[in-house]
Amino acid sequence: MPRPTVKRELSLRWLDLFQICAQKGSLQAAAKETGLTVSTVSHHLRSLEDHLGVELFNHTRRPMVLTPKGRVFLRSIDEALFMIRKAKAEASAGTLAEASLLRIGTIEDFDSDITPEIAVYLSRNMPGCHFTYQTDSSHTIIDMLRNRHLDLGIASAPHEHFRDLQDRLILSDPFVIVLPRVTQRPLSDIVKGQGDLPFLRFSSDLLIAKQIESQMRRVGLSPTSSFECSNNQTLMAMVAAGAGWTITTPLLFARAKRFQSKLAMHKFPGKSFSRTLSIIATPDCSRSVLDLVDAKLRALISKYAISDQTRNNPWLADSFKLIG
């Protein structure tokens, strides 16, 4: 039976808390994120339901489950809340010189040269700003952005819609085969698991590993593997030592300069595939900051990765490139 509609002004706070509860699945998690009490969160949700005259959650279920009308309502307000937050950020952003805090997360791919240069560049252009930098996996950075523990992240973007985040595509980074430079068997035999050179893989919990494994299943490759690692430099060292072969990307290969003389990079056989790197930000991150990071990041990727790799491997030019 429909709830009686209460004629009371709709509160943006109600909508914010509804979205958080829908994402987190519990009042306790929403209370922890917002600093409110559980009873306060519950009161705001009930006020929203009373205003609309419908049940948005099945309150008898744990974790909290949206009703059919709740799911429709969530889809409707996600875009609206994103645009409201973005508008607020743009209206209150001021100049770059006035920025006071920026929390940035980056994947380790940029640690050796690109992230340090971005840090120096931003500190010069935003002199009054306090910066914090965090290096982590792509999925952790995206989770931190969703939980508002970061303002901006540079990460590999999964193939999904960022419901409450804004993203700018930066780089197409194709997957490639990396072998020891001195290898007797042809590439086709090695990737099929023929011979004694095992496959060295990224740790299965990483987004990059999931992308690789999914493509390998599609093309019917299942090479023997007894080594798993979360660190690209370690994988490159193992391949350089002749311990096996791996699948990585030109950007990651470019970071392993000390091992490159003992490595050979090859195009992935059959249908090519790639990961996409993006700048991902919360709606509160102003466009002026995004533009500043975007321009500098593109210049640094071109300087430290694309130029060298496409010069040494011309076949990469059509796939290893900036987007936009």
Image (cartoon, rainbow, N blue to C red):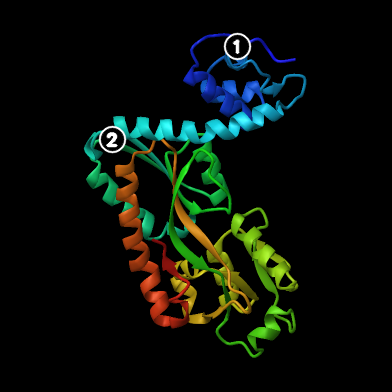
Answer left or right for 64 relative to 293: right
Residue bearing mark 1:
43
Quadrant of residue 269 within the rendered picture: bottom right
The answer to whether any part of residue 25 appears in the image is no
- Residue located 65% across and 76% down the image: 244
Amino acid type for the residue under numbered disc 1: His
Give 94 or 123, whichever is nearer the viewer: 94
Residue bearing mark 2:
99
Quadrant of residue 128 within the rendered picture: top left
Give 15 or 183, whichever is nearer the viewer: 15
Answer left or right for 302 relative to 13: left
The x, y position of residue 237, in whole percent, is: 55, 71
The x, y position of residue 311, in whole percent, is: 38, 80
Answer left or right for 184 relative to 144: right
The answer to whether any part of residue 304 appears in the image is yes
The x, y position of residue 77, in whole percent, is: 53, 30
- Residue located 62% across and 75% down the image: 271
Estimate how packed mark 1 is, as few (under 14), some (14 to 19) or many (20 or more) residues with alpha carbons within 10 Å. Answer: few
**Pointers 1 and 2 in contact (C-beta within 8 Å):** no
Task: Give the mark nearer the N terminus: 1 vs 2.
Answer: 1
Q: Work out whether 144 lies above or below 30.
A: below
Residue 138 is labelled as none
Amino acid type for the residue under numbered disc 2: Ala
